[in-house]
Structure formats: C-alpha cells, structure tokens
Amino acid sequence: MAAPVFIAGDWGTSNLRLSLVDADGAVLDTRTGPGAAAVPAGGFPDTVRGLLADWDAAYGRLPLLLCGMVGSTLGWVEVPYAAAPAGAAEIAGHLHEINLDGRAVYIAPGVKGTNLQGAPDVMRGEETQVLGALITHPDLAAGDHLLCLPGTHSKWVDLSDGRITGFTTAMSGEIYALLSKHSTLARGAAEWDGTPDAGFRQGLARVAEAGADVLHLLFETRARQMAGVLTPKDALGFLSGLVIGGDVAATLARHRALGRPAPTRVVLVGAPALNTLYTLALASHGVAALALNGAEQSTAGLLAYFRRL
C-alpha cells in the first residue's frame, strides 16, 4: 500500500467523512464520525483525537485538511469566506490553520458571492468539490461551465476559466425533507427509496407541462391521491419530481431571463442517486449532464489545497 500523506475530511452539519490519502490522491482508508451540529461546544479537538488515534499510531500525526460546516458558526472555528470570483489560489490562500498536538489542521474558508437574483449567497464545502472537479476533469478549467451540486441546499455554480464567479442556492433537499415528513402532502403516502420511479417521472412531466411555479403544483401530491389518479406508492416520488424538476426549470428560466445562452450540459457533483434524479430532470429540458461523485471530488479538492501548502 502506498504511504498516506494527509487526511481529508468533509465535515458537514450531519456527517463527517475522513479519508486517508496518498500523494496521488488515492483513498487508502475511510471512516465516518458525527456531523458538526452533533459535536458539543469545544468538542472538536477530542472528536478528532478519538477518530484518528489508530491512524496516528500507524503513520504519525498527518496533516488534516477539512472543508464544510466545520468552518462555520456551528463548527470548530468560524473561517471567513473567500470572495468570488475565486479559484484554487484564492480559496487555498484563505485556509485557516490550527495546531492540534503537533498536527497541522487546515480548514477551508467557503466562498461568498452573488446569486442570479443579485443577492448575497454563500457555500461551505461545495467550493472544494468544484475545485476537485477541476482536478479530475481539467477541461473544466477553460471556458464557461454550469455546475449543479445537488443536496440539502443545492448549489448552481457558474465557473469561468477555472474560477467560481457566482452561484445560486436552491433549498430543494430541505424542502423535500420537510414536505415529505411534516406536511399534509405525505399523509397516506408510502415510503419512497429515491429511485426514479413512475411517480418521480410524473412529477417531472407535470413541471414540464405547467412550468416552474412549483408552489402552485405541490398540493397536487395530495389532491391527485384523493382523486384516485396518483397512488400512495408513487406520491413521494411525484413530490420529489416536482421539487427537483422545479429547481431545474427555474434555473434554466432565470438564465433565459438574463439573456444567457442556454446550457447544453450541466456538470453534476453529488451523491450518485441524486445525480441520477437531476440527470433525468435536465434531460426533460434537452440538457445533457456529466455526473461526478461528490465525495470523490471533495477528496480531490482537499488534495489541491494540500499541494499548495
């Protein structure tokens, strides 16, 4: 086995994923831990010590590079955002360093910018995945590209010559979670495993037919069941199709309203299951997708930081 040179960590609100990484970016071992929101005040150092004790015994105290909500007000220390336009140099230049028992810990800053509506927007963790995509797919470093990072708060990122120039957040994942668990829409609906079933495709088709004004479509998840034209089995898939389809349709509509060229391809950076759903939503508008694994891009982005230390 190749020798590890650093530890990569994507520390989000709900989950921590740690990877032992060699000089070429290959992941040698992984483990998981509690999300930033679950770590008690002042508990980040002890959490790291406990999770890395055996790796430390085997390899010494390797540098630890972290991205995500660990650098937020919920995290270990609040790290100021880098300002867009920003590429690898600007973001890596804002890494925050901590000395933990002789181990160098670096926390990525996130990025602040302006969304398509001209309002402030922020991201933490997604910027590292974008930089990772530039490492794994060097063709993205030239020209203009539209990326989508689907998740709890999906990010639509404008990339120009390898730099994040702006981005827009859609609360698609959080809205679906709230509606599917706590709203009247979910009453009587069967569990949904997240696969693109008939219900999901019906939801996409409904958005394509009626437009991106999803607020006026959501209640159909219940009304169609009451009318007997949507089964409880398909209800939550239909709801997801409305939310994701509406996210995609609204983004494309905003690009048209701003006079931007219609994208022919969107680069998706996320979990494979979510990438599949967004690929279908984009295809319903004639837009191709390049799907990249978000965890892999995160590790590649942290490697990009490591190489600049």
Image (cartoon, grey):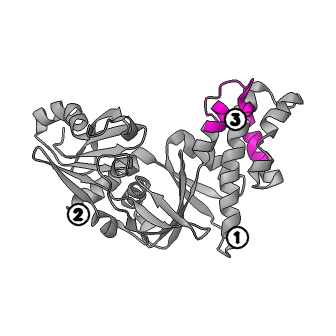
Label 3: element kind: helix
Earlier residue among tags 2 and 1: 1
Say whether residue 159 is visible. Answer: yes
Q: Residue at x 45, y 46 (%)?
A: 293
In the displayed structure image, the side of residue 25 where residue 174 appears, left or right: right
- Residue type, mark 2 in image: Arg
Say whether residue 276 is visible. Answer: no
- Neighbours of disc 3 within 10 Å: few (<14), some (14-19), many (20+): many
Specify start and end residues of the magenta stretch as a single range: 178-206
* Mark-to-mark CA distance, 2 and 3: 44 Å
Residue closest to the far front: 41
Q: Residue at x 75, y 23 (%)?
A: 188
Picture quarter with the N terminus? top left
In the image, 28 versus 244, the foreground residue is: 244
Q: Residue at x 62, y 37 (%)?
A: 178
| Residue 105 x %, y % | 21, 50
